[in-house]
Every structure is written in C-alpha cells, then in structure tokens.
Amino acid sequence: MAAMTPMQALDLWRRTTVESVRRDGPDLSARQMALLLSVYLTPPPHTVRGLSADFKVSKPAITRAIDRLEKLDLIRRKADESDRRSILLQRTVAGSVFLSDFAELVSAAVGEIAAQ
Amino acid sequence: MAAMTPMQALDLWRRTTVESVRRDGPDLSARQMALLLSVYLTPPPHTVRGLSADFKVSKPAITRAIDRLEKLDLIRRKADESDRRSILLQRTVAGSVFLSDFAELVSAAVGEIAAQ
DNA sequence: TTAACTTGATACGAACCCGTAACGAACCCG
DNA sequence: CGGGTTCGTTACGGGTTCGTATCAAGTTAA
C-alpha cells in the first residue's frame, strides 16, 4: 500500500462515509466506530476500563456505546469468569458481516480514487 | 496509491478513528462527517434538498446536522441571492483546519500500516 | 392576482447521549 | 473476618437527535 496525498485521504473518507450513509447503515458516532473496530482488530481482552483509558473517555460513555452496539447486535457482552467484576466484549456474526461490508466500501473507494 | 487488503482498510479506519477520539475531537456521526466532507470536497452548490437527496436522508436530519456543524464553526450557512428559499453551505477557516488535521491523521495511519 | 409548488425550518413526543456523582458487587489484603 | 479498592452500571439534569407532520417564505405559472 503506497502513500496517499492528504486530498486523496479525505476523498477516501468522503466516498466511504457517504456510501455508508446512503445504504442506510446505522449512524454510528466516531466513538462507537472506534470501539467496534478495536474489539474486532486488536487483541483481547476488551474491557470497559481498558477502552475508557485507551480512548481517554469516561467509563459511562463506554458503557453507553456498548449498549448501542449490543442493541444493534454488533458486539456482545460476556462475563469474565476469572474476575466477575469485569466484562469481556466479543464479536458477533452480524458485526463481522457489517465490518466485512464496510471494508469492501473502503476498498471500492480506493479503487475509484486510483482510477481517477 | 496502490491497493489495500480489506484488513488493512479496516485497520486504517481504526487507527484514524481511535486517534481522533483520543484527541478529544468532536464526536461526529457518520452523517455529519459525510456532510462536512461533501461540502469541502465536492463542487458547489450545496443545499439542504441536494444533500437530502444525495444521502437519502430526511431534510430535517440534514438541517440538524448543519445546525451541529455550524455550532462547531465547521461550516457556514449563506443565503442564496438568486433563490432566497435556498441556503448555500460554505467552508470556514476552522473547518479547513479540522479537515487538514484529519487528513494528517489518515496519512499517519497509512504510514503505520505500510511500515508493518 | 391567485393558486400551486418548492425550500428550509420548526413543532412534537420519543429516544439517545453527555459528564459527574453515587452505587452494589466483587476482589484484595491485612 | 473487615476495610479499602476496583469493576461496570445507574441516577441525574440537561442537551441532542430521531422521523413525521406542519409551517412561513419564496417562486412559478395560469
């Protein structure tokens, strides 16, 4: 993957985001998207306190983002058996599908920009 | 700009979004980001009805997104002199700075992924 | 002039989200 | 055991956003 001009970077973001909105996907905030992607792409465990520290965001804000993503069935809460105060965030089938589709949007946008 | 695997595409999105959240930037929704980028990257005029049709989103939803972005001083409303029912959306200095910074975040993430 | 249409904004009740503070439950350690 | 700590959640008052319906203002055309 070669470099990208700032203009190309913004256009990539625009094409992808606009297409995602057009497809009537869930209108996720930056925080929610950051949380979802972290759960799927970074090594576990994923806990409320860990994400709160990582994002520099309050714990209740993380709890609410989890509430929303769990309601959309994009992630799942699971009790931590070794420390029952904690919860572990896990992937779901619907979440995997959502991110797989999203990755295709990005790839398609990359292709459009490269073809310009 | 060469191709990108789906995994790299998602990781690019993750790194950029997480860093943006860490920096305590405004927590924009996908709709708001799509609107902001469209105003800055696509040819004018930008009107409520045009964006509503383009995004397949209701007009009040567009009005509210504009309200938010205008409050953040990222875009500006201007009356259309040739048709005073319409409004035109315009760029601001703060918006240009915001997107310039954002483009740098994307570029930095591209660099990190390339260096992996 | 007047009726029909278009445009963006507003009203509405419901749902969501904010940060701070407080909470019960679970863990740790003396 | 019991006090202190850590965990995620809930309570709170205030602000934001949702979609549908409606509105006033501006434009168009009969």
Image: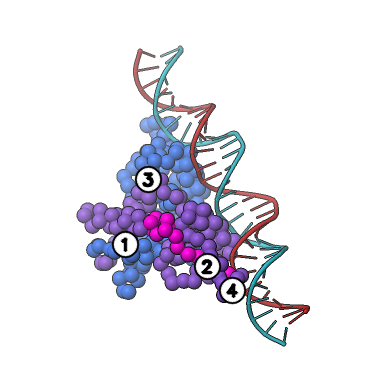
Chain colours: A purple, B blue, C cyan, D red
Cα distance between the residues tagged 1 and 2:
26 Å
Q: Is mark 2 on a helix, strand or loop?
A: strand
- Which residue is tagged 3? A22
Circles 4 and 2, Cβ within 8 Å, touching? The answer is no
Badge 2, how many Cα within 10 Å: few under 14, some, many 20+?
some
Identified at 59% across, 61% down, the residue is A60
Figure disc tally: 4
Q: Which of marks 4 and 1 is in front?
A: 4
For residue D13, side relative to residue C15 (left or right) = right
Badge 1, how many Cα within 10 Å: few under 14, some, many 20+?
some
Quadrant position of residue A99: bottom left
- Which residue is tagged 2? A88
Which chain contains the residue that carries disc 2?
A
Q: Nearer the viewer, residue A105 or D26?
A: A105
Q: Which amino acid does label 1 sit on?
A: Pro
Instruction: Have a look at marks 4 and 2 and say if they share a chain.
Output: yes
- The mark found on residue B6 in the picture is 1
Cα distance between the residues tagged 3 and 1:
21 Å
Residue C18: image x %, image y %? Answer: 58, 57
- The mark found on residue A83 in the picture is 4
Instruction: Have a look at marks 4 and 3 and say if they share a chain.
Output: yes
Q: What element carries label 3?
A: helix
For residue D1, side relative to residue B110 (left or right) = right
Q: What residue type is labelled 3?
A: Arg
Identified at 40% across, 36% down, the residue is B49
Identified at 35% across, 58% down, the residue is A100
The answer, for residue B92, to whether it is visible in the render is no
Cα distance between the residues tagged 3 and 2:
33 Å
Q: Give the range drawn in magenta.
A: A86-99
Residue D22: image x %, image y %? Answer: 54, 27
Instruction: Have a look at marks 3 and 1 and say if they share a chain.
Output: no
